[in-house]
Amino acid sequence: MARRPFNDEPISGLAAWSSRLALFSLVVAGLSVVILRSNLLEIEPALATVAAALILAALAIGLALLAFVAIWRQGLAGLGRAILGLTLGAVLLAYPAYLAQRAYRYPAISDVTTDPANPPRYTALAAQRPKHRIVYPAGNARLQRAAYPDIVPLQLTLPLRTSYAVVLGVLNKRKWQLVESAPPTGNRAEATIEATARTLLMGFRDDIAIRVDLRSASRFGWHDFGANASRLRSLLEDIDEASNNAPEPKPEAPPEKKPAPKRPGQKK
């Protein structure tokens, strides 16, 4: 007697294409992350690659849902493939869904500072930023104060040189790319630091300028989803903690008095 195959039920084509599209979208998403983090392409085509991956993931979810109906009604095989397509598609769309929630929650700004009236300026980083993103937008101040009232200057009870060293130590611990660091000198009563931080997943660059005040601004995009305010809030907390643990500055020794010159005929 002829042996019957273990599973001779036809596989749902919808389920098969759902899993294929989901796997392909996962590859495209991984490729887009590599492109963004390595600067292989300009930001626009790199983001287009991300958008393509998300569209494929959405299609995979749609085909998976249709496959569930077909499998239920027609008794087709392929349930595992439909579940795979649905799961991978949902995983890929989870991140943009999270960003959409933050976009609804936070204002559409991408430049935040502790001093909107006179924000720190980018000098060393100005050449790396788009020209229209060098100056702090005047319209941001009202939105920032309403959404992030806690982003204000941090009052430190340390000398300027000690404060500069504390801030520099915090930035080095965060492994941000230092672009410029100008300590206070005798002729310079102001210390400035400029650095670049990158987002964890996509590697987007956000630039930080530190004077007496702080400023964090995205290089691209009109909405930062609260990232720059969160970065400044965390940075202020770290600086405050580090300043509290900083050693007390030693008092400067008074200058040695030189002996007065002897007058003619003066005895020793």
Image (spheres, rainbow, N blue to C red):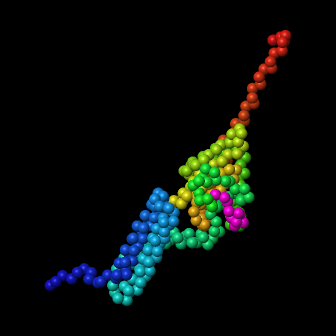
Relative to 102, is 206 above or below?
A: above
- Name the residue located 78 percent from the left edge and 20 percent from the top edge: 259
Relative to 57, is 135 above or below?
A: above
The quadrant where residue 221 appears: bottom right
Is residue 185 among the parts visible in the rendering? yes
Q: Which quadrant: the C terminus?
A: top right
- Of 191 and 236, the residue lying toward us: 191
- For this orientation, the residue located farthest to the left is 1
Q: Position of residue 115 (x, y in %)?
A: 71, 57
All told, the count of numbered labels is 0
- Name the residue located 68 percent from the left edge and 64 percent from the top edge: 140
- For this orientation, the residue located farthest to the bottom is 73
Range shown magenta:
134-144
Relative to 162, is 58 above or below?
A: below
Question: On the rendered structure, is 142 left or right of 104?
Answer: right
- Name the residue located 83 percent from the left edge and 15 percent from the top edge: 263
Q: Which quadrant: the N terminus?
A: bottom left
- Name the residue located 71 percent from the left edge and 39 percent from the top edge: 187
Look at the image and say whether residue 135 sits in the magenta stretch.
yes
Relative to 214, is 8 above or below?
A: below
Q: Position of residue 55 (x, y in %)?
A: 46, 74
Q: Position of residue 223 (x, y in %)?
A: 60, 67
Is residue 201 among the parts visible in the rendering? no
The quadrant where residue 233 appears: bottom right
- Of 239 and 28, the residue lying toward us: 28
Question: On the rendered structure, is 224 left or right of 187?
Answer: left
Q: Position of residue 102 (x, y in %)?
A: 59, 69
Look at the image and say whether residue 164 sits in the magenta stretch.
no
- Of 248 and 122, the residue lying toward us: 122
